[in-house]
Image (cartoon, rainbow, N blue to C red):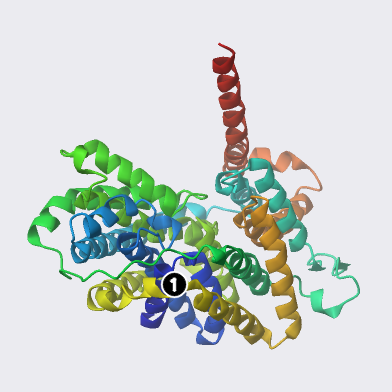
Amino acid sequence: MFLGVFFGILCGAMPGLSAVMAVSILLPFTFSLDQAGIMMLLGTFCGAIYGGSITAILINTPGTANSAATCLDGYPMATKLGQPGRALSISTMASTFGGLFSACALLFTAPLLSKIALNFGVPEMFALGVFGLSIVTAVSSHSIIKGLIGAILGLLLGTVGIDATSATMRFTFGTTYLIGGVQFVALLIGLFAFSQCLVTAEESMKEYKREKRKKLDQILPSKSDIKRTSPTILMCSIIGTIIGAIPGTGGDIASWIGYNESKRWSKHPEEFGHGAPEGIAAPEAANNAVSGGAMIPLLTLGIPGDSVTAIMLGALMMQGITPGPLLFSTQTVDVYSIIISLFMANVFMCLLGYGAIRIFSKISLVPMKWLNPIVFVFCVVGTYAINNNIYDVFLMIGAGIVGYFLIKLDFCMPPIILGLILGGTVEENLRRTLVLSDGSFSIFLSHPIALVLLAIAAISLLSPIFLNLWKKRSTNKQSGN
């Protein structure tokens, strides 16, 4: 877990990488570690979110999208006020508190939700899978239509292999490699890590601006900073946990909302944008609180809250841990090990943050022309290490090339992964439900929980579409006037 946090901070502090890429790269190397592999991935998740604030503060380049709001006050404090160490210390304090707060929320709220979920039968599980698929409109940042296309592509990929009900071959094209279905990790590394490397390589001509590293003035936060930022950190930790628990959101949304609300309730809003301590604490507390919040729907319902937890869902299932309503009753030891690991990951993040800030601050000087080849090697070696199968590498490279063009066309990768993961669950439970009801869909009328979930899924799927239509209509009226 300590190594996972360390690796996560390194990746988070490298502009161009992200928490998704960090977890994707490390995933194949954790298969032989059993439960410890999950702990390492959790550490990487927490460390990468925090690591993005280092370059955001020092060179005004967020290591991850989650830390974009930190640039607004972190960089001015480091340059105009000449206090980079103070900015990093506030960031580390807020990140640690936000992560620990969300872990507490996970510990106390997840078991309650799991008790409610114990009433789930086959129709409810089908409705839950449909609800999980309906969040593609929320994770489709650019175009809802393209998000739906991505989800359909994921569903199609999920049908490859042996049909679990009839044991017939589907879309294997006569090759034994596809009998077991599309290799999930190879596809995931290709879509998220390899494709992003191709994009970064294309953009390497405009190298990130490297500035002279600033001397750190302090490591630990002062009493005045702790007193001033404590209310903001608590408020934004609550905001980040709630946003993280809503499927389809993420740390970038939480950080901007946290920043906006802290400025709204601040006694000195005029200081924001000029190095205000609250402007650093707010986004960092909010985006790190997302880690525990996103694990709530993952563990209790089997629905990933964001892109990273979508990868975590695949990792858990590969280790024999099946997230969902029965997890807390059938695999109690495993689930509480995960929750305790989240606590420890944030503790390690705090120790590494304060103990190695001076080392991590040098990461911003690494040129992308050196970094990109290293990531390429990790992608290939990690993919091959899964099954020692060269065809997995070919699949990863092919998925990466396809992912590159999808990124260029403004497609989002999470809907594809959601379709691939949840497609099997939806199909299997639908067929089992129809067997129980002799082919009649009226069975859902006698299962109120399933009916409510399907209604929520319909609202979740259609509301963004109607909202966009309403916005376009309002804009056309205003332009007409």
Q: Residue at x 48, y 58 (%)?
A: 300
Q: Residue furthest top?
A: 481
Q: Position of residue 410 (x, y in %)?
A: 64, 50
**Residue 182: x %, y % from top left:** 74, 70
Quadrant of residue 107 within the rendered picture: bottom left
- Quarter occupied by residue 296: bottom left
Q: Is residue 223 above or below residue 269?
A: below
Task: Report the residue marked by disc 1.
Answer: 11
Quadrant housing the N terminus? bottom left
Image quadrant containing the C terminus: top right
- Numbered marks: total: 1
Mark 1: amino acid: Cys
The x, y position of residue 314, in whole percent, is: 59, 69
Is residue 171 visible in this depiction of the protein?
Answer: yes
The residue shown at (72%, 79%) is 392
Residue 111 vs residue 281, the one in the foreground = 281
4 sits left or right of 444 in the view: left
| Image vertical order of residue 341 relative to residue 472, above or below | below
* Residue 295 relative to residue 54: left or right: right
Residue 360 falls in image quadrant: bottom left
**Can the viewer see residue 337?**
no
Q: Residue at x 37, y 56 (%)?
A: 287
Residue at image location 21% in from the left, 38% down from the top: 269
